[in-house]
Amino acid sequence: MEMWLKEMQIDGAAMTYKVKETLVRKKTQYQDLAIVDTDVFGRMLVLDGIVQTTIKDEFVYHEMISHIPLFTHPNPKKVLVVGGGDGGAIREILKHPSVEKAVLCEIDGDVIDECKKYLPEISCALDDPRCEIFVGDGIQYVKEHKNEFDVIIVDSTDPFSIAEGLFGGNFYKDIYNALTEDGIFIAQTETPFYLPDTVKKVHNDAKAIFPITKLFMAAIPTYPGGYWSFTIGSKKYDPTEVDTTKIPEIDTKYYTREIHKACFVLPRYIQELVK
Ligand code: AAT
């Protein structure tokens, strides 16, 4: 019998993936967790029916959410990831020799455990001695840390339920305070095509707090719309002003010096959202 996973991308439109095998399916304390093996994208992590990451296209998201801020900051030493229990962002962060410590604050310990078991290509750096794992709510964690991180990466689920408070306003104020004086923050900020209001709100909230706010895009086949936004809030360094000729060679599949510049070039319908 053929098995298909149907993901609602937005009310009225869905994406379907042929599933070869379900490796794990369970209700955690916070969500419905599944890791399935698919024909086209390989293994994928699915939380509450929403695709979070897949073996085939995870590189785009994890490289872009990590290398854009880490190559904008001249000397990132201490980095925090909120969410991101699969470990993909940690793997990319630890490619930067300046990084002494990368803290992962993931609310759901089951995500970490199951990704370690079934997605080793993504979770492989979680055992690195420079990585410190904290299982708990990112909102609380960020509130309790001041002037500590050079870069904060918000690698969260979509803005509902446990992740709702990770999009905007008060959380961004706490992030500002948890950053060092020249710190940078980045968040995954959804699809401008399907959720223009979310992108606009998040951008305005960040702009009210950070002196420099920029949005960039990356092409991610398994995220709704296939074209995903990231928002940066920075205290001092402008990610669009980086001298990319000075960026060292790094082992990546999507991120390049040229992409670092090009990803900030926006189509008009997105420019209009962040005016
Ligand atoms: N690296 C790509 C995968 C993710 S998963 C995002 C993680 O955020 C999940 O494991 C979830 O448990 C965690 N999370 C949600 N809310 C919180 C919170 N309040 N504190 C800490 N961690 C949290 C991102 C996928 C993006 C999907 C786009 N459609």
Image: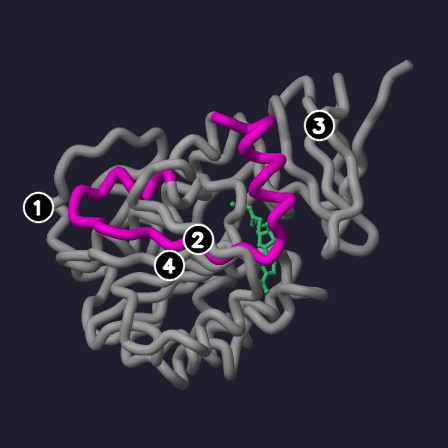
In terms of sequence position, does the residue under pointer 2 or pointer 4 come before the other? Answer: 4
> How does the figure colour the protein chain or chains?
one colour
Q: Earlier in the sequence, mark 2 or mark 3?
A: 3
Q: Residues within 10 Å of mark 1 (few under 14, many from 20)?
A: few
Rendered position, 5 above or below 166: above
Picture disc at residue 36:
3
- Going by the numbered disc 3, the residue's amino acid type is Val
Q: Could you tell me how far apart the alpha carbons at marks 2 and 4 are, in whole angstroms?
A: 6 Å
Q: Position of residue 164 (x, y in %)?
A: 64, 69
Q: Is residue 79 left or right of residue 37?
A: left
Whole-angstrom CA distance, mark 1 to mark 4, is: 24 Å
Q: Which residue is mark 4?
A: 80
Report the side of 87 relative to 63 (left or right).
Answer: right
Disc 3 is placed on an element classified as: strand
Compared with 171, 56 (above or below) is: above
Question: Which secondary structure lies at badge 2?
Answer: strand
**Residue assigned mark 2:** 104
Disc 2 versus disc 1: distance between alpha carbons?
28 Å
Q: Position of residue 246 (x, y in %)?
A: 8, 46
In this view, the mark in front (3 or 1): 3
Q: Which residues are magenta?
A: 91-120
Q: What kind of residue is marked 2?
A: Leu
Which-is-in-front pick, marks 4 and 3?
4
**For the residue with label 1, is its CB less than 8 Å from the closest atom of ligand 1?**
no
Q: Which residue is mark 1?
A: 246
Indicate which disc, 3 or 1, sits on the residue closer to the N terminus.
3
Q: Label 3 to label 1, Cα distance in Å?
A: 41 Å
Kind of residue at badge 1: Lys
